[in-house]
Image: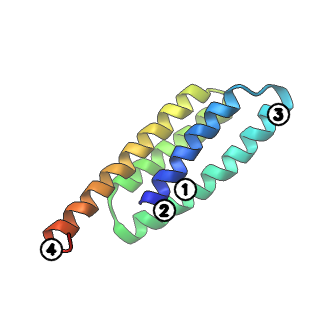
Amino acid sequence: MERIKSELIIAAKLLEFIIDLKGDERSGASKLFRWYLDAVMGEINIAHNVIGRQDFLQAGEKVTAAIEQAQQGRFEEAIRQVSEAISAVASSGQWAMQVLKDSGFL
């Protein structure tokens, strides 16, 4: 979960960088960003399949929306979608912490 959250934070920072680019640089960076988010989606899907939490499903939906927004050049909206994905993953982390506490591991 922490790994996915870190990857999503990096995605938000990449979007902030892409906003300032122009022309071919922006086009190339957008393609790389798409590939990066596709890889993050793979991680989210694995987490959802293993843990089964809806939080990961929601995060995946937000990442998909971020990809679509970025492809349309709406980078600020893409950042918002990534931020919501971060929140969804963080919620799952809180759940995991509670499970560990309830089980006496913390």
Residue that carries the numbered disc 1 in the rendered image: 41
Residue 31 % position (x, y)? 75, 43
Q: Which mark is residue 70?
A: none
Residue that carries the numbered disc 4 in the rendered image: 104
Mark 1 vs mark 3: which is more N-terminal? 3
Q: Is disc 2 in contact with disc 3, using a CB cutoff of under 8 Å?
A: no
In the picture, the quarter occupied by the C terminus is bottom left
Residue 102 % position (x, y)? 14, 68
In the image, 19: left or right of 52? right
Residue type marked 1: Met
Q: Is residue 65 above or below residue 40?
A: above
* Secondary structure state at the residue bearing disc 3: helix
Residue 75 % position (x, y)? 61, 29
Residue 44 % position (x, y)? 48, 59
Q: CA distance from mark 2 to mark 4?
A: 29 Å
Viewer-side residue, 92 vs 45: 92
Determine the residue positioned at 39% across, 51% down: 89
Q: Which mark is residue 25?
A: 3
Residue type marked 2: Asn
Mark 2 vs mark 3: which is more N-terminal? 3
Q: Is disc 1 in contact with disc 2, using a CB cutoff of under 8 Å?
A: yes
Q: Quadrant of residue 67?
A: top right
Residue that carries the numbered disc 2 in the rendered image: 45
Query: Dot 1, how many residues are within 10 Å of its Cα: few (below 14), some (14-19), or many (20+)?
Result: many
Residue type marked 4: Gly
Viewer-side residue, 42 vs 3: 3
* Secondary structure state at the residue bearing disc 1: helix
Q: CA distance from mark 3 to mark 4?
A: 52 Å
Q: CA distance from mark 2 to mark 3?
A: 30 Å
